[in-house]
Image: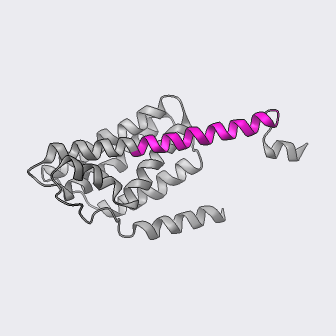
């Protein structure tokens, strides 16, 4: 419990206010689109958390939850580009880090549709924030860049989750399928 509290406080310190919205070069190119999600701890943590949570959930969640995130992030970007204002963008972004981080860290099981809805909800806000940085001249290349970078961050989280799951299964196999708790209760 103590490590969860420490993680929450560190997450809050890293993203108050959300740090990725300071501008990265000329915000109208493919390269600046790639750089945007990689330039702030808030985007990196949330997007890796989606991949981690999806990998630990397994099955179709491995591709559905990241795909839902990227799709809804692009929808949020489009909505903002068209002038739709969304309230509480920054609080929703830092909340996404905490909530998605906890869901991934605790490997919370959820139906595929629910995980996609949660990821998609937060992605709308991330997409809106991306549009706030984007320029009118190069909207398509910029969106393509941050969508690609987001998919890469999701893939990183998936790799962490699959490696973690493999390591856990290896330890369980070495203990004849018993968990540490089961061995202690014998």
Q: Quadrant of the C terminus?
A: top right
Q: Residue 147 appears at what percent x and percent y?
A: 29, 43
Residue appearing at x 52%, y 69% in the figure: 9
- Furthest toward the left, the residue is 137
Residue 125 seen: no
Answer left or right for 166 relative to 176. left
Residue appearing at x 20%, y 58% in the figure: 132
Q: Residue 108 appears at what percent x and percent y?
A: 57, 44
- Most foreground residue, 110 or 57: 57
In the rendered image, residue 30 lying in the magenta stretch gets the answer: no
Q: Residue 74 appears at what percent x and percent y?
A: 25, 43
In the rendered image, residue 160 lying in the magenta stretch gets the answer: yes
Residue appearing at x 9%, y 52% in the figure: 136
Picture colour scheme: one colour
Range shown magenta: 153-176
User: Eyeballing the image, is 92 above or below 69?
Assistant: below
Question: How many labels were placed on the picture?
Answer: 0
User: Eyeballing the image, is 59 above or below 129?
Assistant: above
- The rendered magenta stretch, by its main secondary structure, is classed as helix
Q: Quadrant of the N terminus?
A: bottom right
- Furthest toward the right, the residue is 186
Answer left or right for 93 relative to 135. right
Residue 17 seen: yes
- Furthest toward the top, the residue is 60
- Most foreground residue, 137 or 181: 137
- Most foreground residue, 82 or 166: 166
Residue appearing at x 83%, y 42% in the figure: 182
């Amino acid at each position: 419990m103590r490590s969860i509290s420490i993680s929450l406080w560190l997450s809050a310190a890293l993203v108050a206010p959300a740090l990725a919205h300071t501008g990265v070069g000329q915000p109208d190119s493919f390269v600046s689109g790639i750089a945007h999600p990689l330039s702030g701890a808030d985007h990196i943590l949330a997007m890796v958390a989606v991949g981690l949570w999806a990998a630990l959930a397994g099955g179709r969640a491995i591709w559905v939850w990241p795909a839902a995130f990227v799709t809804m992030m692009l929808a949020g970007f489009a909505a903002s580009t068209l002038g739709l204002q969304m309230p509480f963008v920054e609080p929703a972004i830092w909340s996404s880090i905490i909530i998605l981080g906890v869901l991934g860290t605790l490997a919370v099981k959820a139906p595929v549709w629910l995980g996609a809805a949660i990821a998609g909800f937060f992605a709308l806000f991330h997409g809106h924030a991306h549009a706030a940085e984007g320029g009118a001249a190069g909207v398509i290349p910029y969106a393509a860049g941050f969508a690609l970078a987001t998919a890469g961050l999701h893939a990183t989280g998936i790799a962490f989750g699959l490696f973690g799951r493999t390591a856990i299964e290896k330890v369980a196999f070495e203990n004849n399928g018993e968990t540490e708790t089961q061995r202690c209760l014998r």
